[in-house]
Image: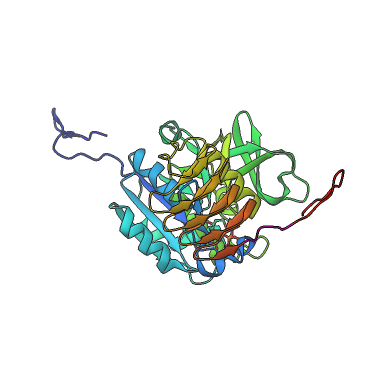
Amino acid sequence: MSRVFVFGQYFFILAPLLSTDEVMRAIIPVAGIGSRLRPHTYTVPKVLLNVGGKPIIGHIMDRILENGFDEATIVIGYLGEKIKDYILRNYPMRVDFVEQEERLGLGHAIYLSRHTISRDPILIILGDTVFDVDLKSLVAQNESVIGVKEVDDPRRFGVAELTNGYISKLVEKPEEPKSKLAVVGIYYIRQPQMLVESLKEIVKRNVRTKGEFQLTDALQLMIERGEKMKPFTINGWYDCGKPETLLETNRHLLASVATPEPRKDVVVIPPVFISPKATVKNSVIGPFATVAEEATVENSIIRNTIVSEGAEVSDALLEDSIVGSNARVRGSYKRINIGDSSELEFY
Ligand code: UTP
């Protein structure tokens, strides 16, 4: 963006001297406890769980960097030091960490980040969701944009109602939704100071929905104050909040992972991710298996499964499974002596 200064009849364009290009900042809230992913989240924060070969938040940070973001705010809380350590080791960009001690909701997480928010637009993106979205076209919009997707039952989401192509109302987890457009967790805010004011207000007035300060409620306040917000359809939206959705996201991400180098006595059925630092012997891996760094898989068949960092799997047949970091799974081979025309099933 250039600035024009007018002095009497002279004017100067200061573009090359004083560049006022907008700084692109992403805000990523990751303070939650991830209760639906216990027992994994007892020791590893949800966003560090491995999916498709790297931690969930790694996929998000990669997208942000690829799309030219300069700065990020990461709201940490539960097991936050581990997240901070991972980000600082892997992402050499400006990152501000904000501590949310009490998990009082997404709106509260953004409210606590307010000192990192300038007048430049911000992107808010949930730390436990992988989006397949063209971020460049999203941030090229002149108005605020809310990522939405049509779902059959939107009652557990924020819901967007539209009028003439704009969002006329946002309601958090309505009992009787008036539309099927679910708010999926990606928001581009052109007037972030207006959002900060709205958040301050809902915190001051103690406006809570389902006990939490909701981002949806602050955005609704912005709409009431005249802010224009457009829906942006997100088709590729991969939640990592529950075991089934984590495995589904793993399947999706593996589709774009290169087939690993062949290893002796290992049969690979793509798509799979096998870390070069994993040990795999005498096994069949795939389809849809992730074997993370320092993991060991021996004499096993694994499919649609995530074997996390440092885990050990031996003599096992695994399907639709998540093996946590440093966990051990030891199976056994069956001994049978079965006669003709018999039927035997193992569950
Ligand atoms: P979720 O609603 O999925 O909560 O938050 P959670 O704690 O991660 O998981 P469950 O429900 O206990 O299984 C969506 C995103 O918003 C962040 C979470 O860390 C997650 O990335 N969040 C949520 C916060 O940072 N602070 C909050 O107060 C609430």
Say whether residue 19 is left or right of residue 99: left
Which residues make up the magenta segment? 331-335
- The tally of labels here is 0
Q: Nearer the viewer, residue 31 or 170?
A: 31
* Ligand 1 visible in quadrant: bottom right
Residue 160 at x, y = what percent? 64, 41
Relative vertical location of residue 277 with respect to residue 14 in this rendering, above or below: below
Name the quadrant containing residue 333: bottom right
Residue 311 at x, y = what percent? 50, 61
Residue 276 at x, y = what percent? 38, 49
Q: At 52% across and 35% down in the image, what residue appears?
A: 255
Q: At 51% across and 40% down in the image, what residue appears?
A: 268
The answer, for residue 185, to whether it is visible in the render is no
Q: Residue furthest bottom?
A: 101
Say whether residue 82 is left or right of residue 304: left
Q: Residue furthest right?
A: 341
Residue 110 at x, y = what percent? 47, 58
Magenta stretch holds residue 274: no
Magenta stretch holds residue 334: yes
Q: Quadrant of the C terminus?
A: bottom right
Q: Nearer the viewer, residue 9 or 182?
A: 182
Q: Nearer the viewer, residue 249 or 200?
A: 249
Q: Quadrant of the N terminus?
A: top left
Q: At 64% across and 52% down in the image, what residue appears?
A: 317
The answer, for residue 144, to whether it is visible in the render is yes
Name the quadrant containing residue 63: top left
